């Protein structure tokens, strides 16, 4: 086996056996399995659903679930590595062929990879570490009518509630701004937007 | 807010013993700015200058505090309104002097009252930085811009007295989050204009 694109580590021995088993599937079966896999990759939280669909596939095609799970594990190695390394569909195809998958099936999978990779890349970027990520912002503004020191006030206040993700917990931060501060804040945020856009 | 009583006005006449008009002015300012709890020590400091007993100094300081706070509370701005507060038999010159001093200070005092109002923690400063993320454990190569926003927030001034606690909160925003935030801020701006134009 030559150098693979999707990984630099040695591939588990079981993989070539799993590829051989995959080759035994009909084109239709392989296509159905591929669809299943990409649906899971694009919605990685839906583990239960994925396992159910896998089990249904196994039953419908008279394959034992255990070996099927191993095959799936082997297949997934490639898209996971490919995502990390921004591989092209040609590279994905080449890797599958190098692992022992038939050209026809490798091309098909690579094609599906091309179609799904923008979504998958976006997901991976979304998983990148963020420090104190701002999740939500709620606001209210009103007029201070009076206080214990001033019978009539009539000044405008703006209150923001920022919901921040600290580690795995959410924290609420409450801030009050005066009107000039609000306009200054808005102005600064618009400058940030311009800056972010120039780098996109 | 204690209403002004006759005893207060009686105590105010102690000011006639003050060494100068500036001393009266100074005392008025200190009495307004001092919270009720700090009036005792203030009275003790004022004692020697006025050559009065500790008890009399305390009555004076309390009366002056009540008078100045009352004027600010009611939002009185004209000389007539302030002069009306004093009883008929109050010393004429002292009454005029106090009214003059109060009018001089009224807007600064009003600002002071507003600044020390209770509120949620206040934003005191804001800084930002745009970073480009080039790599992570989930993707080896990328170029994703992200914004770090640092907000300096001061806890309620009334709770902290002279040592306001300022905390810095650094928050990260993706481009999408920023766009959503700007949408929200834009809506606030539109509503503010609508209110202002009514």
Image (spheres, rainbow, N blue to C red):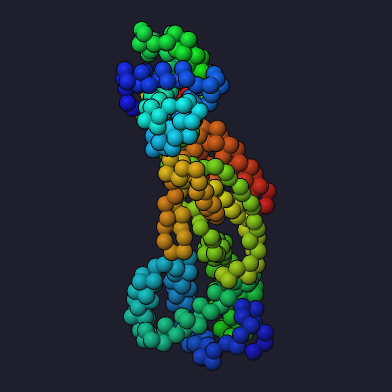
Q: Position of residue B73 (x, y in %)?
A: 40, 23
Q: Is residue B69 visible?
A: no
Screen quadrant of the N terminus of chain A: bottom right
Q: Is residue A118 visible?
A: yes
Q: Position of residue A106 (x, y in %)?
A: 57, 78
Left or right for A30, reference B131: left
Give the residue drawn at x 64%, y 52%.
B130
> Residue B89, relative to residue A194: is it above or below?
above
Number of numbered labels in the structure image: 0
Give the residue drawn at x 67%, y 52%.
A199
Left or right for B144, reference A68: right
Q: Position of residue A126 (x, y in %)?
A: 53, 61
* Closer-to-camera residue (A166/A198): A166
Q: Quadrant of residue B138?
A: bottom right
Give the residue drawn at x 53%, y 36%.
A182
Q: Position of residue B6 (x, y in %)?
A: 31, 17
Left or right for A136, reference A185: left
Q: Quadrant of residue A93?
A: bottom right
């Amino acid at each position: 086996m030559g150098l693979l694109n999707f990984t630099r580590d040695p591939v588990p021995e079981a993989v070539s056996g799993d590829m051989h088993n995959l080759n035994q599937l009909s084109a239709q079966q392989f296509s159905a399995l591929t669809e299943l896999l990409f649906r899971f990759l694009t919605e990685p939280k839906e583990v239960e659903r994925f396992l159910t669909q896998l089990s249904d596939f196994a039953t419908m095609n008279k394959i034992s679930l255990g070996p099927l799970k191993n095959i799936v594990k082997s297949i997934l190695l490639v898209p996971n590595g490919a995502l990390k390394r921004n591989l092209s569909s040609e590279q994905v195809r080449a890797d599958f062929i190098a692992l022992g998958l038939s050209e026809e099936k490798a091309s098909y999978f690579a094609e599906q990879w091309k179609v799904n990779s923008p979504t998958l890349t976006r997901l991976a970027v979304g998983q990148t570490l963020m420090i104190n990520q701002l999740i939500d912002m709620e606001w209210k503004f009103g007029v201070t009518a009076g206080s214990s020191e001033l019978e009539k006030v009539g000044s405008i206040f703006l209150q923001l509630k920022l919901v921040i993700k600290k580690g795995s917990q959410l924290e609420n931060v409450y801030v009050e701004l005066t009107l000039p501060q609000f306009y200054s804040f808005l102005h600064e945020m618009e400058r940030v937007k311009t800056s972010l856009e120039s780098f996109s | 807010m204690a209403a002004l009583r006759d005893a207060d006005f009686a105590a105010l006449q102690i000011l006639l013993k003050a060494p100068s008009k500036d001393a009266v002015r100074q005392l008025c300012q200190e009495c307004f700015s001092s919270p009720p709890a700090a009036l005792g020590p203030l009275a003790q400091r004022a004692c020697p200058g006025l050559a009065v007993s500790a008890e009399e100094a305390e009555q004076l300081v309390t009366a002056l505090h009540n008078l100045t706070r009352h004027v600010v509370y009611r939002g009185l701005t004209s000389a007539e309104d302030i002069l009306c507060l004093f009883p008929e038999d109050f010393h004429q010159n002292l009454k005029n002097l106090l009214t003059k001093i109060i009018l001089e200070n009224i807007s600064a005092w009003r600002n002071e009252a507003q600044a020390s109002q209770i509120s949620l923690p206040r934003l005191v400063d804001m800084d930002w930085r745009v970073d480009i993320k080039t790599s992570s454990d989930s993707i080896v190569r990328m170029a994703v811009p992200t914004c770090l926003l640092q907000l300096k927030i001061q806890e309620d001034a009334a709770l902290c007295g002279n040592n306001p606690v300022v905390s810095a909160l650094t928050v990260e925003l993706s481009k999408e989050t920023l766009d959503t935030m700007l949408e929200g801020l834009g809506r606030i701006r539109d509503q503010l204009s609508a209110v202002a134009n009514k």
